[in-house]
Image: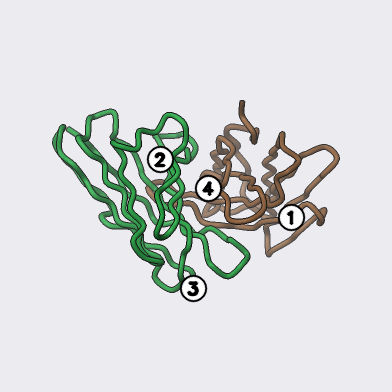
């Protein structure tokens, strides 16, 4: 149980375009989803916390107008990278926290974004 | 300020040996300490986790040792196997539905 999926698993886009990444909890309801970014050989850095039905909370230094997060349901959160630039190329990983009280976080498989 | 410090950065262990990775934390308000394993191109997977009211937790070949007074915790992998070669991250979290704070990771290589 506790499976989190991400789509797409990888994407290549041109500079200036927007890309949407989906994060789904497949077998549990997630009141909270977290979005992380990971550069090669580095740790995971929290970008934002997404709560169902409310605005996301962004970490310091993360542009909310550039990284749009929508958490429309208890099983789906989306991250849209707007006007992507090569420096946005990274591995984006979401995690979903279960509703049941332990707040265990289950991670998705990640999305590799390459901006050319 | 790095809230969770992890060492070593990389580790090479012989097959069958014990791999030990250490972490230290700053904030005594943290109350949940998980370890994650990550293979290249994949998301992290939870290995084992501990809360500060317990000094040790064992699951199969993986053991967490927790020293609350020293604000340190460590992961021990017994009988290390080549399939254990991955990057390991320690993390910490406040109580409730809060985000994880990760260490910088340890790249483990288990050689035959």
Residue, disc 4: B85
Seen from this angle, which residue lies furthest top? Answer: B1
Q: Is residue A53 left or right of residue A81?
A: right
Q: Are marks 2 and 3 in contact (CB under 8 Å)?
A: no
- Kindly identify which chain the residue marked by label 1 belongs to: B
Residue B51, numbered circle = 1
Q: Are tags 4 and 3 found on a single chain? A: no
Judging by the rendered image, the residue that carries numbered circle 2 is A37
Work out whether disc 1 and disc 2 sit on a shared chain.
Answer: no
Q: Position of residue B32 (x, y in %)?
A: 68, 52
Q: CA distance from mark 3 to mark 1?
A: 22 Å
Badge 2: chain ID: A
Q: State left or right for residue A81 relative to residue B77.
A: left
Q: Is residue A63 above or below residue B68?
A: above
Q: Which residue is mark 3?
A: A1
Say which of marks 4 and 1 sits in front: 1
Task: State how the image is colored.
Answer: by chain
Chain hosting mark 4 = B
Chain B hue? brown
Q: Colour of chain A?
A: green
User: Tag 1's secondary structure?
Assistant: loop
């Amino acid at each position: 149980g506790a499976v989190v999926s991400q789509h797409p698993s990888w994407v290549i886009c041109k500079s200036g375009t927007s890309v949407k990444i989906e994060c789904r909890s497949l077998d549990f309801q997630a009141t909270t989803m977290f979005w992380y970014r990971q550069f090669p050989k580095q740790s995971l850095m929290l970008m934002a916390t997404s709560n169902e039905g409310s605005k996301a909370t962004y970490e310091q230094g993360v542009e909310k107008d550039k990284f749009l997060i929508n958490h429309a349901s208890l099983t789906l959160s989306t991250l849209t990278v707007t006007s992507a630039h090569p420096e946005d190329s990274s591995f984006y990983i979401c995690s979903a926290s279960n509703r049941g009280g332990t707040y265990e976080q289950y991670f998705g498989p990640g999305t590799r974004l390459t901006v050319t | 300020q790095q809230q969770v410090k992890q060492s070593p950065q990389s580790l090479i262990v012989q097959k069958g040996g014990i791999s030990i990775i250490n972490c230290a934390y700053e904030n005594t308000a943290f109350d949940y300490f998980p370890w994650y394993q990550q293979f290249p191109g994949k998301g992290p997977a939870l290995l084992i986790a501990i809360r500060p009211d317990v000094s040790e937790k064992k699951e199969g070949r993986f053991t967490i040792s927790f020293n609350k007074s020293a604000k340190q915790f460590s992961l021990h992998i017994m009988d290390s196997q080549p399939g254990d070669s991955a990057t390991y991250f320690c993390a910490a979290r406040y109580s409730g539905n809060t985000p994880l704070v990760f260490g910088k990771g340890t790249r483990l290589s288990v050689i035959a």
